[in-house]
């Protein structure tokens, strides 16, 4: 990771919103609000009382955060610190996630549910790959190609190792690494390969906002509708509104187009801590409510 800004930060892309647009912090606050709605549905769906539109609106939060992460990567003064803030939090959350599977059984909700949110791990992998593209753009081919190809190909190597050494102790050790310090995109349920794909496309089209928006829309249709149709051909039209509604993230393109390229005012640290804190608070509340309703 390099410490200084790249020449990307000097490019100014005109805002396509007639009202002057919104700042980066405004986009993050919007994404946070939508994420909370989504996670209310995620944690309290067992009550049968949470309206489905909470989750529909929540589909916009991940692509908005992804857009903000890419903008942050482009404009930050210190990419190493930027990466480490996201990565270390992802390691912390990954360790908790791993514990639910292996040692923290008492903390699992009685219906077997526990949080599996790994979006920060997905962002960590993406930042490494984006740095690889940046190195290649500066003709640092060896380190650039390594940064791009190793995270992409790592799932194949790890899968081969786990098949070659099926001993429980070895698989336990590999699983611990994958959940914490060595995240692998295809093993991540929250984002994972999709974040890597969408992130690279948004980054490579970053200098033309209209092209970026079009690329995002096309990728969303191909990934969330066409791909899913071939994987589950029995899906009905109504299922794309009740079960398979990830495609609704396409509407995130509207606030993306309104981004005016300014940072805005806000607390930078809030975004790093709000994600894990609100997840575990909501999870704890959901456990208490579940126990109360089933006492």
Image (cartoon, rainbow, N blue to C red):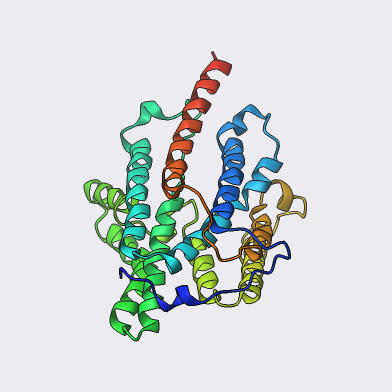
Image quarter in which the N terminus is found: bottom left
Going 37% across and 44% down the picture, which residue do you hit?
93
Q: Is residue 228 visible?
A: no
Q: Is residue 148 left or right of residue 267?
A: left
Where residue 281 appears, as percent x and y from the top left, is 47, 31
Number of callouts in the render? 0
Q: Is residue 232 above or below residue 49?
A: below
Q: Residue furthest right?
A: 237
Q: Is residue 90 left or right of residue 200?
A: left
Going 31% across and 75% down the picture, which residue do you hit?
146
Where residue 89 appears, as percent x and y from the top left, is 35, 48
Given residues 238 and 24, the one toward you in this image is: 24
Q: Residue furthest top?
A: 295
Where residue 147 appears, as percent x and y from the top left, is 33, 72
- Residue 5 sits in quarter: bottom left
Where residue 110 appears, as percent x and y from the top left, is 48, 25
- Residue 19 sits in quarter: bottom right
Q: Is residue 87 left or right of residue 283?
A: left
Q: Is residue 181 visible?
A: yes
Image quarter in which the C terminus is found: top right
Given residues 24 and 69, the one toward you in this image is: 24
Going 32% across and 84% down the picture, which residue do you hit?
141
Q: Residue furthest bottom?
A: 139
């Amino acid at each position: 990771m390099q410490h200084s800004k790249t020449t990307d930060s000097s490019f100014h892309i005109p805002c396509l919103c007639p009202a002057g647009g919104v700042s980066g912090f405004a986009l993050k606050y919007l994404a946070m609000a939508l994420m909370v709605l989504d996670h209310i549905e995620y944690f309290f769906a067992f009550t049968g009382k949470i309206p489905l539109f909470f989750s529909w609106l929540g589909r916009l939060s991940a692509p908005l955060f992804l857009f903000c992460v890419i903008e942050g990567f482009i404009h930050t003064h210190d990419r190493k610190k930027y990466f480490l803030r996201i990565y270390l939090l992802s390691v912390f959350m990954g360790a908790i996630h791993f514990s639910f599977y292996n040692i923290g059984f008492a903390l699992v909700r009685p219906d077997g549910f526990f949080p599996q949110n790994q979006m920060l791990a997905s962002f960590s992998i993406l930042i490494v790959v984006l740095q690889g593209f940046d190195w290649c753009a500066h003709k640092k081919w060896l380190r650039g190609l390594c940064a791009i190809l190793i995270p992409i190909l790592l799932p194949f190597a790890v899968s081969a190792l786990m098949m070659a050494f099926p001993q429980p102790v070895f698989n336990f050790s590999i699983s611990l690494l994958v959940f914490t310090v060595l995240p692998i995109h295809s093993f991540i349920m929250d984002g994972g390969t999709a974040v890597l794909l969408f992130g690279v496309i948004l980054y490579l089209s970053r200098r033309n906002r209209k092209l970026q928006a079009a690329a995002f829309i096309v990728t969303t249709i191909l990934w969330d509708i066409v791909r899913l149709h071939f994987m589950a051909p029995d899906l009905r039209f109504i299922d794309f509104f009740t079960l398979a509604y990830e495609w609704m993230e396409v509407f995130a393109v509207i606030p993306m187009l309104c981004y005016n390229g300014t940072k805005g005012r806000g607390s930078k640290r809030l975004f790093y801590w709000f994600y894990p804190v609100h997840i575990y608070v909501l999870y704890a509340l959901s456990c208490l409510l579940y126990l109360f309703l089933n006492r």
